[in-house]
Amino acid sequence: MTAMLLSGVLAAGMLAALAGLSALGLHAFAIPFAATAALLAMAPASPLARPRTVVVAYAASMVPALTVVAFVPVSAFTATMTGSVAIIAMLVLRAVHPPAAAGAAMIGVQGGDWMFLVDGVAPALAAVLAFALAAGALIPRYEYAWGWR
């Protein structure tokens, strides 16, 4: 019961950090980042939650998605294309993180520009990873570490 409560508090802290960044004018509160926060809070030992996986997966998803929407109009088809490319890239790179595929699909349907990497992706990932890493260092039995395996 205590572990569940701590996971809930950790997730709430991560979401509050994302909301705080958004209040500063950054685009850090988006559904894929909230899903990443939930995954890190609830399943920190999962291979899908490793810091390397999260960072590589978002890079492998967002860069192709932003490239596609620079040339193709946004639509459900574009979202399908960007999400599919993200999934393939994550599999090739052995860095599978499902919220990153959702982020690519979000770009495909909503559009975006390269600044989203700077004012959305980077601060959102920094916030949730910082919370998870701090929790891994401070909370007993919450096993989250910066392993790059």
Image: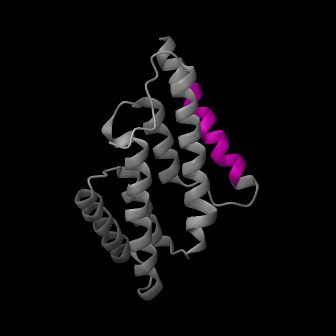
Q: Give the range drawn in magenta.
A: 8-21
Residue closest to the far right: 24
Q: Which residue sits at x=60%, y=33%? A: 12
Magenta: main secondary structure: helix
Q: In this view, does 103 lie to the left or right of 92?
A: right
- The spot of residue 9 in percent (x, y) is 59, 26
* Residue 45 visible in the shown view: yes
Residue closest to the far bottom: 71
- The spot of residue 30 in percent (x, y) is 55, 55
* Residue 108 visible in the shown view: no
Above-or-below relation of 72 to 3: below
Q: Does the magenta stretch include residue 15?
A: yes
Q: In this view, does 20 lie to the left or right of 81?
A: right
Q: In this view, does 23 lie to the left or right of 5?
A: right
Residue closest to the far top: 1
Above-or-below relation of 129 to 90: above
Q: Which residue sits at x=33%, y=76%? A: 77
